Each structure stands twice: as C-alpha cells, then as structure tokens.
Image (cartoon, rainbow, N blue to C red):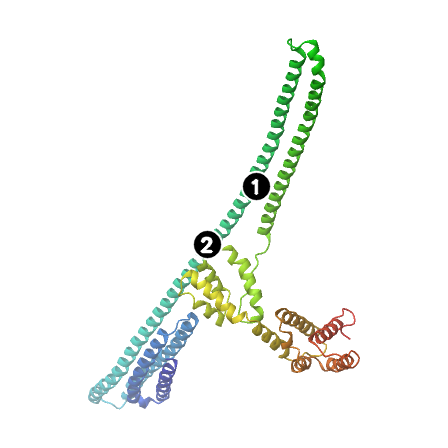
Amino acid sequence: MKQDRTSAKRALTKKHNEIKQLILDPSNASEISKKMLHLETAIAKFSNAHKLLRQNLHDEDDIQESNDYFNTEMDRITDLKQNVNECNERLILVSDIHDVRPEDSVSSVGLRQKSHARNISQRSMAGSNISGASTSSSISLSKAKAAAKKARLQAQAASFRKKRSLQEEQFHLQRLAEELELETQLAMATAEENAYVEAEKMETTILQQMSDKPTRMGSSQREYDVRIQSDARNVVESPNVNECERVDTSPDQTSSNEVRKRNADVVPDKNLEATRKQRDDDNAQFERFLQTQEQSANALMLPKPEVPVFSGDPIDYQTFIRAFENLIETNTDSNSARLYYLIQYTQGDVKELMKSCLSMKSEEGYAEARRLLKRRYDQDYKIAASYVDRVTTGPMIKSENAAALQRFSILLTSCKNMLRTIGYSSKQDNPDSFRKIIERLPYGMRKNWRDVVDKITEKESREITIDDIAAFVEAKARASSHPIFGNL
C-alpha cells in the first residue's frame, strides 16, 4: 500500500514539475491546459492510494504521519494551481495592452476590437479550460482534505474508545484485587478469632472440671466421717449391752475403730493423688492445645512455600514430587484438582504428558499421571545417567574462578551421595568418567591431581574413587575461596 502511494506521488511530482517549467514561457498556455488535465488524473490516483494506505494503518502515530504527508503534497499542488491562474490573468492583460496602437483609426479600432473580441473569446475558452481544470482540482483537494480530517477524527475516536475500555478493565481488575485482599484479611481474622474462642472454651472446661472434683471428693469424705462417728456412738451408747459384753467386745471394737481410722486416712490420700494426676493431665492437654494454636498462628505468618516447576530432568524429580505431595496432595482430596496442579507445575514434554490424562475420569487420570511420572523420571539408572552426564560434560572451569569451582564441588558431592544412595556408584567409578571430570578443571589443578593420583596408587596401593576426586576438588575450592588469600 505504501509503495503504491509512493508511485502515485512520484507521477504527481513529475506532472507538477512539468507545469512549473511551462509557466515560465507565456506561449505555453495551451500546453499548460493539457498538462492540468493530466495533473488532475495524477491527483485522483494519489488520493485513492492514500485512502487505501490509511485504511490499513492502526497506530495513531502512523496515521498522523500519513495524513501530514498527504496534506503537504496537496498544499504544494494548490500553490501550483494558484500560479497557473495568475499566469493566465497576466497573459490576458498583456494581450489587451498590445492590441491598442496610436495609428489605429476609429474604424480600424472597431475592426481591431472585433478581431480582439474574437481573440479574447478564443483565449477565454482556453482560460475556461484551465479554470475548469483548476476548479475541479480545487474541489478534489477539498474533498481529500475533508476525507483526511474525517479519517483522523475517526482514528482518534477509535483510539479514545480503546483507551477508555482499557482503563475500565484496569479499574475493574484493581477493584477485584482489593476485594480479594480484604477477603483474605477477613478470613485470617476470623480464623484467629475462632482459635481464641476454642482456646477459651477449652480453658473454661478444664477449670470447671478441676473445680468440680474437689467438691465431690469433699462431699464423699464428709459422708464417710459422719458414718464412722455414727457407728462409734451406737457402740458406746447402746443400752442393751451389759458390762460383760462390753468387756468382751472392747478389743474387737477397738480393733474395728483402728481399721476404720486407718481407712479414713488412706482414702483421702488416694483421692487427692488421683485428683492431682487428673489436674496434671488436664494442664498438659491444655498446654498442648495452646502450642498447637500458636504453631497454627505462626504458620500463617510464614512465607508460603512454592512447588518447583518440573521440566523433565530426572535429577529434580524427587525434589518436585515431595514438594507436590506435601504442599498440594495433602491439602486437597480432589483428584481432578491434583491433576490440574500437576499440569500447572510442569512444563515442556512433561506438561503435554500430564495433559494426555485429562480425557480420563478424575480418579483414573490422576493415578495414571503419577504412574507415568514415576515410570519415566523415577528410574534409578536414568537419575544416575543424568548425574554422570552433568558432571562429565560442560565447559572447562577457568583458573581462579572460585565461584564456579565451588559449584562444581557441590555438584560432585551431590552426585556421589545420590549414586551411593541408589546403588549406582559403579556407573561413575570408571577411568573414562574420571578423566572427563578432571578435564573440566583448570590446568594448574590438573597438574596437582597427577601428584595426588601417584600418592594414592603408589603409597596407599589402591584404586582411584569418586571420593578422592570429590575431596580433591572440595579442598581446592575451599582454598580458592579463602577470604584473605583466595585471590592472590
């Protein structure tokens, strides 16, 4: 579209320059008239090309730039048309002056006036052609300017409507965010209030139980003492018992009183011990409840843990699946929701694999997704191969790059521990893997490693292991990271 307008503008400029050259010679009136007709055709083509280009523009700056370009060209054409009209007027005036001469008689003048009238008529016809062409071009120019102004206003109106729509949408989203924040704070306040209410109820219940038990114990003890005293009075004051009987029964009565006295001493001790034990149990239960509530309140203040996104690296599978089970699976019983969370926290091929289970029922879909994850990424040999590949391949560590050496040391230690855990230590304990690991170290460290190898094989008489390499790299990383002498 822009190229078409450029071509039309080039043709219009060519016609403009041709007419501008013809104006310099007064004898080119008829030729100027013809060129003006061609100029109108070029103006029409240029205007149409501009309209098509403007309809395909959407950016407000591009539209404004296009309209300015069109208006500038139209102003130039308007100036040309004014020059043509002024030239025609000058030609008519000069012709009238040259037609009147002193030697002309009245009759000659009359004849000359007739001839001049014919000449004026002819020039008038030519001028009318030019004037008609000029009028037509002026109308076209006015229409083009009006169309350009209308297009500019339409573009501004569309931009304004779009801007207003975006502002309304932004305001709506901001309001929703504020409402969500308020609801979250309200929910937290409600949960805290419920926790305090439950704690208060528990404390009231425990205190009530503790106050009821001594009362019951005191009541039982008083009843027992009253019964003992009543029995004693019956024995002493009974009128049916003679002196002999009193003498005979005194030892028995004395023994019975002593037993009852001992029982009276023992029973309160047992009740007091049971009450004290129950009170201690209740206090311990209340303390546990308060600790639970405090832990819950502290948990609300902790930053929310996040589940890492799993991209398919077997090394990261165990970390991902443990975080998913602790943070997602334990907090929802919906297998459908669990499956959608699996899709959310995976990416790449793993995400597509999880999406393939959406067509199944919720129970089957989640179980199948977990099974596929375990089968593809929880294989010991895949984890071992990934670790070995990570430590044996990669760029060589530059000399004195303490940070890179420290990271490599940690990677070696992680690899060693993981392979030992899954029983694949032999996968890395081979000369090829050892050589690839050492080749990633700086040249100076490789020279030092030769001395370490010689000491192990000659003095200790044993084979090189991954533990030796890990210990060597760890020592060098520690030395290069020394806070004072690390960078020498």
Query: Residue 352, located in which quarter of the rendered image?
Result: bottom left
Image spot of residue 63 (x, y percent): 40, 72
Residue underneath mark 2? 176
Query: Residue 437, located in which quarter of the rendered image?
Result: bottom right
Residue type at numbered disc 1: Tyr
Which residue does the image show at 40% across and 60% down from the upper left?
A: 165
Query: Residue 420, located in which quarter of the rendered image?
Result: bottom right
Asked if residue 28 is positioned above or below residue 193 in the image, the reply reads: below
Q: Quadrant of the C terminus?
A: bottom right
Which residue does the image show at 55% across and 58% down from the upper left?
A: 326
**How crowded is the residue under tag 2: few (<14 C-alpha within 10 Å), some, or many (20+)?**
few
Which residue does the image show at 62% across and 27% down from the upper left?
A: 217
Q: Are marks 2 and 1 in contact (CB under 8 Å)?
A: no
Residue 348: tell me if it is visible.
no
Element at badge 2? helix
On residue 258, which mark appears? none
Q: Locate residue 196 relative to residue 362 in the image: left or right.
A: right
Q: Quadrant of the N terminus?
A: bottom left
Image spot of residue 112 (x, y percent): 22, 88
Image spot of residue 299 (x, y percent): 59, 51
Image spot of residue 284 (x, y percent): 64, 41
Which residue does the image show at 69% across and 74% down from the upper left?
A: 405
On residue 196, which mark appears? 1
